[in-house]
């Protein structure tokens, strides 16, 4: 029985005598139209390899397998892995590899971000598609955006408020938005009501797609960039120039001159700057005084 409705999903849990694990953030999509929307947003091709995180009962896994060459389903819950394996056998689906592991603990398996595949060869044209537990959203995105071999795109079903924060723009920037937008371009595809899940979470979700990955890496060293942005947001409600002076040890006059050269308002707060502003500012500060910035 495919888990595409509340009744079917509950029936599977009764059959195996198990319950959703709250500590793992298990909330299962029980509306096939939501699955179809995720698939559509991912823009999959027949030769793609998809990494799916938190495959659960396989509602998304099964539909992914119909669209791509290979699905690598990483699931932390051993019980879910067993159920999914049985479902795949009944459906005669043979292009799914299940890995019972914590995606964030690369010691337990070969991280796909470094080119791993089920056959031991290099992954080409791979994408990340998942309905992930809310509590691992930030570390998951960071893991794959910072990887040596990032995916072509990332399509995630995540908490609505987190998706909105990730897609924020000046003058309402935040560190989470900067940490994603430095590497890529995020976009909210659609919002998903909490009524489409079982157990029903307390908040709504959103389909977030991240593309154009790796766009800023060659412009500036990430360590320099994030050292500057963390300093800038150290006291978000205060003026940026004071934060940079205090945290980076650079004289206000020097920062002000850089502001003028870059066209940055001297009274700006960290949230007022765009990603381009931050890249230019970080580069300028580092170029002026390597010892102070590093």
Image (cartoon, rainbow, N blue to C red):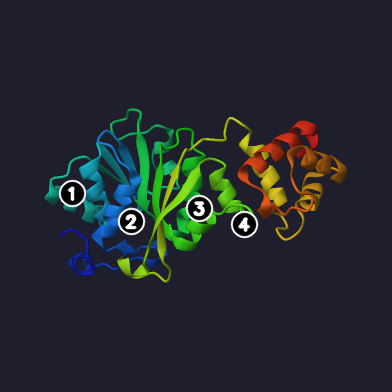
**Mark 1 or 4 closer to N-term?**
1
Q: Quadrant of residue 24?
A: bottom left
Question: In this view of the protein, which residue sits in the foreground, 50 or 240?
Answer: 240
**Mark 3 or 1 closer to N-term?**
1
The residue labelled by disc 1 is 88
The residue labelled by disc 4 is 172
**Mark 2 or 4 closer to N-term?**
2
**Mark 3 or 2 closer to N-term?**
2
> Badge 2, how many Cα within 10 Å: few under 14, some, many 20+?
some
Q: Quadrant of the N terminus?
A: bottom left
Query: What secondary structure is marked by label 3?
Result: helix
Query: What secondary structure is marked by label 1?
Result: helix
The residue drawn where x is 58% and y is 30% is 218
The residue labelled by disc 2 is 77
Q: Position of residue 66 (x, y in %)?
A: 20, 44
Q: Quadrant of the C terminus?
A: top right
Q: What is the C-alpha distance between the residues marked 3 and 2?
A: 20 Å
The residue drawn where x is 35% and y is 70% is 200
Q: Position of residue 139 (x, y in %)?
A: 50, 50
Please state which of the two labelled residues, at mark 2 or mark 1, is closer to the viewer. Answer: 1
Q: Position of residue 202 (x, y in %)?
A: 42, 71
């Amino acid at each position: 029985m495919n888990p595409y409705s509340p009744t079917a999903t509950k029936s599977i849990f009764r059959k195996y005598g198990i319950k959703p694990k709250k500590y793992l953030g298990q909330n299962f999509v029980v509306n096939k139209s939501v699955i179809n929307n995720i698939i559509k947003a991912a823009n999959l091709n027949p030769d793609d390899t998809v990494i799916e995180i938190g495959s659960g009962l396989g509602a998304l896994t099964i539909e992914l397998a119909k669209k791509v060459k290979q699905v690598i389903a990483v699931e932390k819950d051993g019980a879910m892995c067993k159920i999914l394996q049985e479902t795949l056998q009944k459906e005669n689906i043979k292009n799914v590899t299940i890995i019972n592991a914590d995606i964030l603990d690369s010691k337990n398996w070969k991280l796909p971000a470094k080119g791993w595949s089920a056959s031991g060869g290099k992954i080409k044209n791979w994408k990340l598609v998942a309905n992930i537990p809310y509590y691992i959203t930030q570390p998951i995105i960071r893991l794959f955006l910072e990887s040596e071999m990032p995916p072509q795109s990332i399509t995630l079903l995540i908490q609505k408020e987190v998706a909105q924060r990730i897609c924020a723009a000046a003058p309402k920037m935040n560190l989470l938005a900067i940490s994603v937008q430095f590497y890529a371009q995020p976009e909210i595809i659609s919002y998903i009501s909490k009524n489409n899940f079982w157990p029903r979470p307390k908040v709504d979700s959103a389909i977030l797609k991240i593309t154009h990955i790796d766009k800023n890496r060659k412009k500036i060293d990430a360590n320099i960039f994030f050292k500057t942005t963390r300093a800038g947001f150290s006291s978000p409600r205060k003026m940026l120039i004071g934060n940079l002076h205090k945290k980076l040890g650079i004289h206000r006059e020097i920062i002000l001159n850089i502001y003028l050269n870059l066209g940055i308002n001297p009274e700006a707060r960290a949230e007022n700057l765009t990603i381009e502003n931050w890249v230019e500012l970080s580069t300028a500060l580092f170029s002026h005084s390597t010892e102070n910035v590093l």
